[in-house]
Amino acid sequence: MSQTKDISSEPVKACIFDLDGLLLDSEDIYTDIFNDLLKPYTSTPLPWTVKARQQSRGEDGYEDLLHWVLHQDTVPYFKSKVVKQENRFEACRPLPGVLRLLYNLKNARNIFRGARDIELAIASSTSRRLFGKKTKYNLGLKSFFPTDCCVLANHLDEKKLKEKPAPDIFLEALRCINEEHLLRPKDLTLPLEIKPADCLVFEDSISGVAAARAAGMRVCWVPHPGLRRVCKGMEQLVLAGRMKEVNEKLSGMTKDAMPAEGRWLKNVRTKWVKWDLPNETSSNAQELRAKDQKYESIMSEDGWAEMLGSLKHFDYGKYGILGTKHAMR
């Protein structure tokens, strides 16, 4: 979707959050599970050039993952192996800055006329079952979101909606926000319906950014350190939602790192050559985040998207979110 209107001074009325790798450190757990399951086929840790194309893309993402190791398992069969590891997600914890941001947004109002509360929602490709596992020991995080404003994979299946990078999940989250808002006492000084351009999406994946842009929403991209490194020089493409171009570049980087014969031979275990792109796993992800304490914010050329290094660096004033009551520092 092409967005040309200058919205830099428009206050945000709703914030929609992805879950995995954005609110919780579950992406690192996924990486460890994938590495464990793929050990019979490669000794190389899953590189971010591949994981970037797998994130939040459902069956298509799993197909990219299996193609990387020339693995002939079907996607449903491989996913069933992942499901058997689901108890590992109970170890999920909030990422740096998450609880502070959610607390401040919950206690904030925007600068729109009489000032209205900021609506919060989750839009995640995870299933209800896994959502329960991931939030089992994170009830504080879960409490910031109304139950009816948590749109998950089952929701998409029931309504026959498409996964990211289609905009469906974010538009459905907005529909839930507006529906939930209608149940409250009316304030006739405020418009009842929130529009897509009034929303700010928080995402960590390339496909999530593309979905938010396609929905006509603003977006804050907060990539994992490993994803940020392999996307260096491509930030504007990601922020513009040009996922196909980014994936083509990432695919070329992955192929260049593999021996030619390893690209085509099937049922042959190939030892990949070493290369200089980082293969971060959960064992060193925390160390990488600690090293990169300050990240430069990058704004898209049209002003509709921003890249942040951490949610700790979110600028409330830039999005018209002011007057936080009892702000958490």
Image (spheres, rainbow, N blue to C red):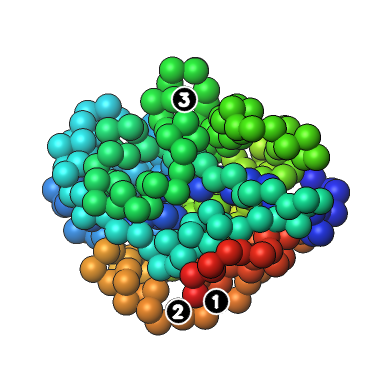
| x and y, in percent, of residue 186 in the image | 69, 32
| x and y, in percent, of residue 221 in the image | 57, 58
User: What amino acid type is highlighted by mark number 2?
Assistant: Asp
Q: Are marks 2 and 1 in contact (CB under 8 Å)?
A: yes
**Vertical relation: 134 (above or below) 179:** below
Front residue of 198 and 147: 147
Residue at figure coordinates x 27%, y 64% from the top left: 282
For residue 156, the mark is: 3
The residue wearing badge 1 is: 295
Q: Earlier in the sequence, mark 2 or mark 3?
A: 3
Gap in Å between the C-alphas at discs 2 and 3?
36 Å
**Vertical relation: 66 (above or below) 184:** below
**Vertical relation: 152 (above or below) 30:** above
Residue 39 visible: yes
Q: Residue furthest right?
A: 5
Q: Earlier in the sequence, mark 3 or mark 1?
A: 3
The residue wearing badge 2 is: 292
* Quarter of the image that includes the N terminus: top right
In what element is the residue under mark 1?
loop
In what element is the residue under mark 3?
helix
